[in-house]
Image (tube, rainbow, N blue to C red):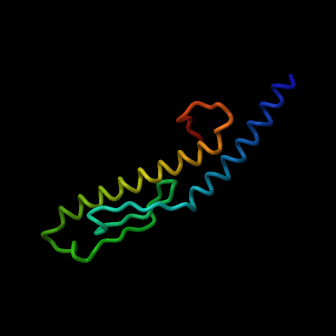
């Protein structure tokens, strides 16, 4: 019975830490870049796009398709960085609990 109570206490502590981590992830920002810096996307670690910066040289009608491709690439770069940041935070939080990798919370 003591083991069960200990597990329940540990689960409650984990839940509290998870909520704090979710709030922290909303504050952590990553930057995705493409085209050698011509397009930059700033995103929170919770995958919320915060800003997009486009070099003025790309704002020409004939560059539209290139700009679209660069935006997709920059967003993908930012998303990968946000996912990595989230996984690192999760690993530091659950590292000692023996939970399977990729177990999603939130």
Residue 22 placement (x, y as % from top left): 61, 52
Residue 91 placement (x, y as % from top left): 59, 42
In the image, farthest residue toward the top: 1
Name the quarter where the N terminus is drawn: top right
Instruction: Evaluate whether residue 83 shows in this view.
Output: yes
Question: In this rendering, would 10 be left or right of 57?
Answer: right
Question: In this rendering, would 49 be left or right of 9?
Answer: left
Question: In this rendering, would 97 be left or right of 103?
Answer: right
The residue sitting at 77% across, 30% down in the picture is 7
Instruction: Evaluate whether residue 106 shows in this view.
Output: no
The residue sitting at 23% across, 58% down in the picture is 69
Residue 89 placement (x, y as % from top left): 59, 48
In the image, farthest residue toward the left: 62
Residue 45 placement (x, y as % from top left): 51, 55
Quarter of the figure with residue 65: bottom left
Looking at the image, residue 14 lies above or below residue 51: above
The residue sitting at 66% across, 46% down in the picture is 18
Looking at the image, residue 49 lies above or below residue 10: below
Looking at the image, residue 70 lies above or below residue 103: below
Count of residue discs:
0
Name the quarter where the C terminus is drawn: top right
The residue sitting at 24% across, 61% down in the picture is 68
Quarter of the figure with residue 104: top right
Quarter of the figure with residue 4: top right
């Amino acid at each position: 019975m003591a083991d069960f109570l200990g597990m329940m206490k540990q689960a409650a502590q984990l839940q509290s830490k998870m909520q704090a981590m979710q709030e922290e992830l909303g504050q952590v920002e990553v930057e995705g870049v493409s085209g050698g810096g011509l397009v930059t996307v700033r995103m929170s670690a919770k995958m919320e796009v915060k800003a997009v910066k486009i070099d003025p040289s790309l704002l020409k009608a004939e560059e539209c398709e290139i700009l679209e491709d660069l935006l997709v690439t920059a967003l993908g770069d930012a998303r990968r960085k946000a996912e990595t940041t989230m996984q690192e935070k999760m690993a530091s939080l659950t590292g000692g609990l023996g939970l399977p990798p990729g177990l999603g919370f939130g």
